Amino acid sequence: MFDHFHIIKLANEKIDELRRALQREAGILERRYIKGTRYLLLMGEENVPEHKRAALEQALHFNEPLSFAYYLKEELRWLWSQPTQAGMRKYLEACCAQALESGIVQMISLAKTVRMHATGILNYFKHRISTGKLEGINNKIKTLKRKAYGYRDEIFFVLKLYSLHESRFKLTGC
């Protein structure tokens, strides 16, 4: 829960909640600016396709809470590039303070969760460990199990797991 992926995932979930709430409350005119922006809001700013930038900018222009949440998420992405742990702490606290001052329920919830786990998040500066590889391996295992509809022989399943990574491991007897 403390690595870059999970923090940004949490921010994206809160943005999506906010987008849904705004869409429910919006009138017909405002709704057209929100409709179709879900994946644009979840993308990093640099990953938004050029032909979709206008739609994103329009949605952000006409929806102040959504705009605030999107740009806060983009700022939060810079947390892990801070040069010192003290700088990282100060940056994290500033992001949380902004979220709390916004008055947006979803952003307040995000700030509270991030503050609750601040120690673990800041420990990333000392121990730059990410769970990305582990989650990738778990995903491969789940895909293998789903693809095969289960294996009757557990030893064969273990051998298939070893072969997932192009036999980087020497297969020896059990």
Image (cartoon, rainbow, N blue to C red):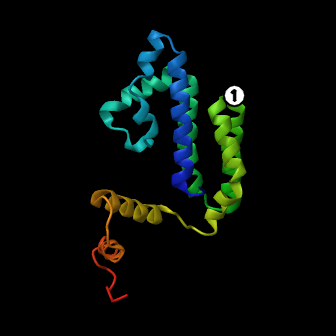
Is the residue 10 above or below the residue 26 in the image? below
Label 1 environment density (alpha carbons within 10 Å; few <14, some 14–19, many ≥20): few
Residue 126 seen in the current view: yes
Is the residue 54 above or below the residue 122 in the image? above
Picture quarter containing residue 89? Answer: bottom right
Residue 95: x %, y % from top left:
66, 43
Residue located 31% across and 85% down the image: 171
Residue located 68% across and 53% down the image: 117
Residue 121: x %, y % from top left:
64, 57
Residue 114: x %, y % from top left:
66, 48
Residue located 51% across and 53% down the image: 5
Q: Is residue 142 left or right of residue 87?
A: left
* Residue that badge 1 annotates: 103
Picture quarter containing residue 31? Answer: top left
The amino acid beneath tag 1 is: Gly
Residue located 57% across and 34% down the image: 69
Is the residue 162 above or below the residue 109 in the image? below
Residue 154: x %, y % from top left:
36, 73
Per the image, label 1 sits on a secondary structure element best described as loop
Between 94 and 27, the one lying in front of the other is 27
